[in-house]
Image (cartoon, helix red, strand yellow):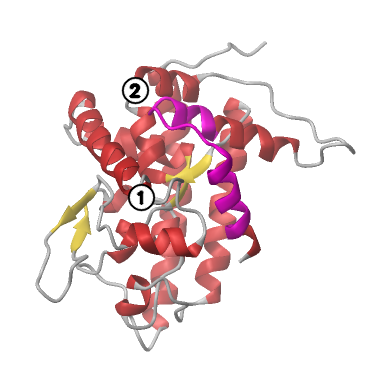
Amino acid sequence: MLRSELSFTEAVQVCVPFVHDIHSRWKVKHSEIAETQKAHSCQKGCGACCHYGLISSSSLEAFFVLTHCLGSGQTLSGLHEASMTYVENFKLACSEWGHLPFAKASRLAFLKKKVPCPLFVSTPLPDQPYSGHCGVYEARPVICGQFHSTEAPKKCEELEPHGTESAVIDLGEVAGHTLREFERAQFGKSALGHLPLIFAALTTEDGLKAFLRRDEPAKPSDADPHAQETLDFFFYAELLGCLGISLGEADFADLERAQAE
């Protein structure tokens, strides 16, 4: 019978090599495709997407980033302090419209607040308000390259549709799905949500304990064919709760608007 919880060391030993392998293969394919593009707009210095209010990542990838930061010499207390500063700025921005940013209107409103991911190193320039670079570039989640733009960065700053490579998106979906299935196999669940918030939760005692906990995976039924997705969502809500964020009616209403877009 599986133990109900993995230790941090055991989780590192089990998860990190797998995520590293998936990330490495994804990045090789991504680079091969990018080299064939006539336009290569995404580059260091353009960080609009690092200011988004919804940087979609799994809890497994957030854990991978955490281990990368700790392995590079950063302390858990330092990461927690920086992350919680972000959380407070995030909540303050969202307080103006009363819910988390899911639909385009609220995501654009959040973007205009210029609240960068706590893993982002800002170097603002007069004509580039979102400029800077990723501080964990080698460990960045798949999503951070999946929607690679082949057009002007201004489109990303306005959340407008932009040119990309369908092969990159398809490969990213496969990589992301593989990572989430692995996490479900190890822990019974896999949260999918805003990377900075999941990362922040993992720097708390309760959040890290929740991640390391092994739950029974959900069994789809005729009554609830999406039982696993529901369990995963509740896990994300649990992680948000570790940050003092509770999902309410306004959040679910905006999520419904996002799903309809």
Q: Which residues are magenta?
A: 236-258
Residue wearing tag 1? 96
Q: Please rate how many residues cluster around mark 2, counting C-alpha atoms within 10 Å: few if below 14, some from 14 to 19, many from 20.
A: many
Residue wearing tag 2? 204
Q: Residue at x 86, y 35 (%)?
A: 221
Instruction: Find residue 162 and report its image quarter.
Output: bottom left
Does 198 appear in magenta? no
x then y, percent, for residue 159: 41, 71
Residue toward you, 162 or 53: 53
Label 2 SS: loop
Classified by dominant secondary structure, the portion drawn in magenta counts as helix
Residue that lies at the very extreme toward the right in this rendered image: 222
Would you say residue 166 is visible in this rendering?
yes
x then y, percent, for residue 111: 33, 61
Residue that lies at the very extreme toward the bottom in this rendered image: 38
Would you say residue 41 is visible in this rendering?
no
Image mark for residue 243: none
Which label sits in the foreground, 2 or 1? 1
Q: Residue at x 56, y 30 (%)?
A: 235
Q: Is residue 146 left or right of 84 when viewed as pictured?
A: right
